[in-house]
């Protein structure tokens, strides 16, 4: 559709466009308005738009002229892109905007958070992929790297385009179920049906003669997928909860691989192209080799990286901080661009705590990083060989060569990075903390 048609019919802000606009507003208010959110009158003065027009654009429920959005974006030095808006027929009822968070960020960010940092290629690639028939996206990262925040963004994008949405967290399943394939799959089907507001028909449709995998596949193919003409986006979060149950994981993941192949390569008569899968898991969990090849070498793989220097600088501005080049580099060196630790550091810097004081708290039991560090220590304490390997890394600033399995386990925890074949601590925070606590274990 050409631009003249869009002007006549109007457009609505997409989730991505609203998030970009919110971030720009927050950044400018931090620099020019004492960090206080702009009032409607102030926004009218900044943009030159009327109050009614601004309210309509921000509520994202009624279309506005494309020129209006262009003007709104330009007022905050943003260029309007095709991903920032939708045509009215492509939208469903969108969630109302949320207020800016004013306490240390702990947990996933909402779709419109001004503190969400877009990483080049990742958000665009993942949100576009889930619109493709039979898609599978594998999202992996250490804990607190932003997986769930990205999932929220993907869900908002999927909602914009009218997909049915189901999120299943395997952390919610009873441990006794995870040890039994039939119970796991029945639970899985029941949760998906409930999320779609469909009656539970497991007793009528589950046939033990054919086995659990067949019954689960049939339940999706004959009941869940045909329940609507809308494609189904199924997010399986905390997939790593399965990894310690080798036999169950092998069958469950093999089933997902088969669904993907039917969706991508099946005939036009089947319904599997209507299913789009997102598998999210933490790299902290060790994946047995027996399940390593199931769905993990198909689809699109997305691994979240740490923040770059430029991204940390952008985030600092959103907190109302104008860090000099030296302090900016010191912060990146201290926490290595770790998303959660960077957010935490910037929040306390915004509370007038100097960076030097924060850096001195690295080994303090009540320091701002203590909760995160204790959890990492608990994981190492449970595996003596891993603990000893981290002690060697912490004592070797230039890096050390470790057995591959230990290297990859520490990398999965986010504790090390590689310089050629040498493992080095991923940031000064980890090196100082573990060098202090593990100095006698090298």
Image (cartoon, grey):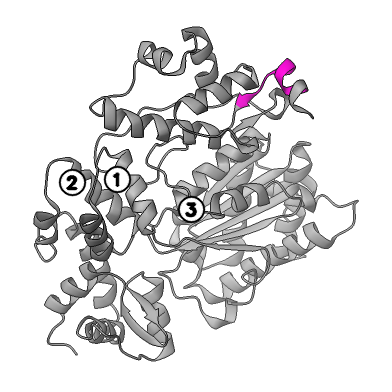
Seen at 74% across and 26% down, the residue is 3
Q: Secondary structure at mark 2?
A: helix
Residue annotated with mark 3:
119
From what the image shows, is residue 87 above or below residue 313? above
Which percent across, then down, holds residue 243? 50, 71
From what the image shows, is residue 1 above or below residue 282? above
Would residue 143 be counted in the magenta stretch? no
Q: Which residues are magenta?
A: 5-12
Q: Quadrant of residue 88?
A: top right
Q: Secondary structure at mark 1?
A: helix
- Foreground of the two, 215 or 91: 91
Which percent across, then down, holds residue 179? 51, 68
Which percent across, then down, holds residue 415? 32, 72
Is label 1 in contact with label 2 (beta carbons under 8 Å)?
yes
Which percent across, then down, holds residue 194? 60, 39
Seen at 42% across and 53% down, the residue is 146
- Foreground of the two, 438 or 243: 438
Spatial CA distance of label 3 from label 1 is 16 Å
Seen at 24% across and 77% down, the residue is 381
**For residue 41, side relative to residue 125 (left or right):** left
Would residue 8 be counted in the magenta stretch? yes
Q: Is residue 208 visible?
A: no
Residue annotated with mark 2:
349
Picture disc at residue 344:
none
Q: Secondary structure at mark 3?
A: loop
Q: Is residue 213 visible?
A: yes
Query: Which quadrant of the figure contains the N terminus?
Result: top right
Spatial CA distance of label 2 from label 3 is 23 Å
User: Looking at the image, is mark 3 or mark 1 earlier in the sequence?
Assistant: 3
**For residue 319, side relative to residue 73 (left or right):** left
- Foreground of the two, 50 or 188: 50
Q: Residues within 10 Å of mark 2 (few under 14, many from 20)?
A: some
């Amino acid at each position: 559709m050409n631009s003249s048609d869009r002007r006549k019919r109007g457009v609505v802000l997409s989730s991505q466009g609203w998030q970009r606009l919110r971030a720009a507003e927050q950044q400018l208010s931090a620099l020019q308005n004492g960090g206080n959110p702009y009032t409607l009158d102030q926004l009218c003065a900044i943009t030159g738009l009327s109050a009614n027009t601004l309210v309509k654009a921000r509520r994202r429920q009624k279309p506005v002229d494309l020129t209006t959005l262009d003007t709104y974006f330009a007022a905050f030095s943003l260029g309007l892109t095709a991903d920032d808006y939708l045509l009215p027929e492509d939208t469903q009822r969108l969630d109302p905007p949320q207020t800016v968070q004013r306490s240390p960020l702990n947990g996933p960010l909402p779709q419109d958070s001004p503190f969400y940092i877009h990483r080049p290629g990742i958000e665009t690639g993942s949100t576009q992929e889930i619109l493709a028939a039979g898609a599978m996206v594998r999202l992996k990262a250490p804990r607190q790297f932003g997986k769930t925040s990205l999932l929220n963004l993907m869900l908002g994008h999927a909602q914009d385009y009218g997909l049915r949405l189901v999120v299943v967290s395997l952390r919610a399943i009873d441990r006794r179920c995870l040890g039994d394939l039939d119970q796991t799959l029945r639970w899985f089907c029941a949760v998906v049906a409930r999320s779609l507001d469909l009656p539970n028909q497991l007793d009528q449709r589950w046939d033990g003669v054919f086995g659990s995998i067949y019954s689960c596949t049939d339940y999706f193919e004959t009941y869940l997928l045909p329940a609507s003409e809308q494609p189904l986006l199924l997010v399986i979060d905390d997939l790593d909860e399965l990894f310690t149950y080798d036999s169950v994981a092998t069958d469950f993941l093999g089933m997902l691989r088969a669904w993907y192949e039917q969706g991508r390569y099946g005939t036009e008569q089947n319904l599997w192209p209507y299913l789009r899968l997102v598998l999210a898991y933490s790299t902290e969990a060790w994946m047995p080799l027996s399940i390593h090849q199931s769905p993990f070498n198909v689809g699109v793989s997305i691994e979240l990286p740490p923040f770059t220097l430029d991204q940390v600088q952008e985030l600092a501005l959103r907190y109302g901080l104008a860090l000099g080049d030296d302090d900016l580099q010191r912060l990146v060196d201290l926490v290595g661009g770790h998303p959660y630790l960077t957010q935490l550091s910037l929040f306390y810097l915004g509370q007038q705590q100097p960076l030097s004081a924060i850096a001195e708290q690295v080994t303090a039991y009540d320091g701002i990083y203590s909760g995160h560090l204790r959890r990492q220590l608990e994981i190492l304490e449970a595996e003596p060989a891993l603990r000893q390997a981290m002690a060697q890394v912490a004592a070797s600033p230039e890096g050390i060569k470790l057995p591959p399995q230990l290297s990859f386990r520490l990398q999965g925890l986010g504790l090390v990075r590689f310089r050629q074949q040498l493992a080095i601590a991923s940031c000064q925070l980890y090196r100082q903390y573990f060098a202090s606590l593990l100095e006698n274990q090298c």
